[in-house]
């Protein structure tokens, strides 16, 4: 039978444990997701109704990753966004309270959607060569300055946030299996090279800002349009779903981005 002294000691110890601070639990991080249709989740075919034409999806990688890491997500990525749109409409959501920011933008600045549309035409009807050359000129000469300015603004608004910049996959595996498109092997090669060029410029700007860069190229090899399994939609109905990651593709993005967060 325990002595009165030992009981009092145990009681005092218990009281001390109750009164003293327990193990600290970190507050949920605040995560802000910026970007274009690849970031918003276009291609997954299911969208948050309140997001309207921005077409934000609960299948998008930032939504998946926020749940995985227990973050409070501010999801402002929007279909069709260029760097100027992110600056004007999405950047205000980045404040000093942000712990994590992801940003994926640049493809629309290069007019990638119109380039794909042009190159999908039969050779006698479209001018893929000129379209690709125009996109590459923008990527080389115009986009870096825009990204440098945007990344600088993110840093100034949330100086202590961890910022992750996300790149784009190659769209093609070398085969066009869609009856409504006419991509030649050479055109697909040049379009993939343009995606690589885009990633190189985005990566360089991210590095200059001290931000992390996630390159999806290697993970998507074999899973692009007409891949097995296909992670990027080919020509789709509605057309807006075309050449964007599907649900599996967004999950693959989530697997890539999460470690960087």
Image (cartoon, rainbow, N blue to C red):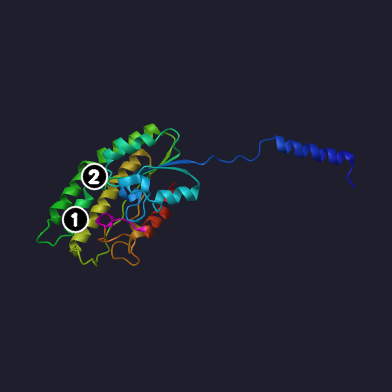
* Location of residue 208 by image quarter: top left
Would you say 20 lies left or right of 50 here?
Answer: right
**Camera-side residue of 51 and 163:** 51
Task: Classify 117 as above or below 76.
Answer: below
**Left or right of residue 122, residue 72 in this image:** right
- Residue 200: image location, x then y, percent: 29, 48
How packed is label 2: few (under 14 Cα within 10 Å), some, or many (20 or more)? some
Magenta part mainly helix, strand or loop? loop
Q: Secondary structure at mark 1?
A: helix
Visible in this render: residue 150? no
Mark 2: which secondary structure?
Answer: loop
Return the residue found at the far front: 49
Measuring from the top left, give residue 187's x and y in whole percent.
18, 60
According to the picture, the residue beneath numbered tag 1 turns out to be 117
**Cβ atoms at labels 1 and 2 below 8 Å apart:** no
Q: Is residue 152 visible?
A: yes
Q: Mark 1 Cα within 10 Å, few/some/many (few <14, many 20+)?
A: few
Mark 1 or mark 2, whichever is nearer to me: 1
Q: Which residues are magenta?
A: 238-246
* Residue wearing tag 2: 109
In the rendered view, tell whether residue 138 sits above or below residue 241. above
* Residue drawn at (13%, 52%) of the image: 130
User: Residue 243 in magenta?
Assistant: yes
Location of residue 230 with respect to 212 vertically, above or below: below
Q: Earlier in the sequence, mark 1 or mark 2?
A: 2
Q: Residue at x 36, y 54 (%)?
A: 46
Report x, y in % for residue 142.
21, 41
Image quarter for residue 14?
A: top right
Image coordinates for residue 204, horizontal then vertical, percent: 31, 44
Work out how far the residue at label 1 is from the one at label 2, CA to CA, in angstroms. Answer: 15 Å
- Residue 217 in magenta? no
State the residue at coordinates (80%, 39%): 11
């Amino acid at each position: 039978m325990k002595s009165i002294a030992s009981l009092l000691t145990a009681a005092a110890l218990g009281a001390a444990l109750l009164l003293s601070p327990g193990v600290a639990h970190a507050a949920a991080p605040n995560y802000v997701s910026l970007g274009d249709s690849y970031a918003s989740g276009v291609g997954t075919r299911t969208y948050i109704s309140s997001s309207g034409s921005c077409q934000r999806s609960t299948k998008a990688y930032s939504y998946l990753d926020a749940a995985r890491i227990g973050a409070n997500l501010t999801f402002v990525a929007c279909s069709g966004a260029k760097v100027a749109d992110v600056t004007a409409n999405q950047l205000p959501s980045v404040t000093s309270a942000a712990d994590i920011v992801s940003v994926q933008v640049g493809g629309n600045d290069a007019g990638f959607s119109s380039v794909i549309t042009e190159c999908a035409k039969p050779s006698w009807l479209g001018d893929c060569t000129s379209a690709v050359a125009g996109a590459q000129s923008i990527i080389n000469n115009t986009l870096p300055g825009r990204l440098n300015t945007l990344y600088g603004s993110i840093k100034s608004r949330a100086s202590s946030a961890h910022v992750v910049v996300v790149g784009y996959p190659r769209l093609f595996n070398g085969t066009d299996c869609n009856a409504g498109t006419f991509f030649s092997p050479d055109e697909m090669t040049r379009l993939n090279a343009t995606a690589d060029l885009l990633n190189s410029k985005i990566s360089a700007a991210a590095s200059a800002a001290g931000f992390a860069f996630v390159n999806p190229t290697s993970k998507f090899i074999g899973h692009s349009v007409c891949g097995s399994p296909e992670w990027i939609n080919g020509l789709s109905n509605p057309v807006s779903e075309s050449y964007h990651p599907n649900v599996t593709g967004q999950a693959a993005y989530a697997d890539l981005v999460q470690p960087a967060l």
